[in-house]
Image (cartoon, rainbow, N blue to C red):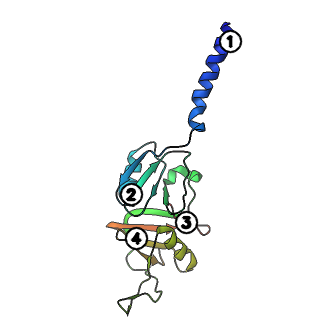
Amino acid sequence: MLLLLLLLLLLLLLLLLLLPLLLPPRLLSQVTGYADEVADACDANPACVSFVMNGTYVGYLKGPGQQQFKKYWDSYCKLAAGSACAGTYTFKRRSSIPGNDIDCNYKDNGQLQPFCQVFGGLSDVAAECDANPECVAFDFKNTANYNLKKAAEPRQYAEGFSTYVKRAGGKSNAASG
């Protein structure tokens, strides 16, 4: 009888240890703000390994083992998370690359501009950058416009901007940093 009770306790302990792996993962929390502000919240939370952005002003912190990429969501991973978070762009918050603009015959109010501005979601812009052999990075201003860049440096501090630098190796379906 004692052996049966010990066996049941051991089984219960094993179930308690495995339960988190069997249940669907939950988001850690919702953060209102741009990607740089959500990245700050992720850094401040030791359980956070990544976050996803729903649009440009709402993010969700994620813990280990949670699905990292979702269609129509932009995913970001801490570089320390390693291969658990795949991605081909490194996110640099509060930075901008002055100059080094790619010319793609972009017109603003009918006037030809010496830069390439792209509109759309982060994944769309990453695809544009991937399709352009000159593009190694792009800047994002919190007002939802992106500029393709032919150099990743020099970067400068710029409130309201983020830079996405292409990592070595391949094209992406989603940008993450």
What type is the residue that disc 1 sits on? Leu
- Where is residue 152? Give x, y as percent: 46, 72
Q: Are marks 1 and 2 in contact (CB under 8 Å)?
A: no
Q: Which residue is mark 3?
A: 167
Helix, strand or loop status at disc 3:
loop
Query: Within 10 angstroms of label 4, few (less than 14), some, or many (20 or more) residues?
Result: many
Q: Is residue 37 left or right of residue 85?
A: left
The quarter of the picture where residue 160 lies is bottom left
Foreground mark, 4 or 1? 1
Foreground mark, 4 or 3? 4
CA distance for labels 2 and 4 = 16 Å
Q: Which residue is mark 4?
A: 140
What type is the residue that disc 2 sits on? Val
Q: Earlier in the sequence, mark 2 or mark 4?
A: 2
CA distance for labels 1 and 2 = 52 Å
Q: Is residue 165 left or right of residue 112?
A: right
Q: Earlier in the sequence, mark 4 or mark 1?
A: 1
Q: Earlier in the sequence, mark 3 or mark 2?
A: 2
The quarter of the picture where residue 144 lies is bottom left
Mark sitting on residue 162: none
Foreground mark, 3 or 2? 2
Q: Residue at x 43, y 87 (%)?
A: 106
- Where is residue 107? Give x, y as percent: 40, 89
CA distance for labels 4 and 3 = 17 Å
Foreground mark, 3 or 1? 1
Mark sitting on residue 4: 1
Mark sitting on residue 58: 2
The answer to whether residue 6 shows anywhere in this view is yes
What type is the residue that disc 4 sits on? Phe
Q: Earlier in the sequence, mark 1 or mark 2?
A: 1
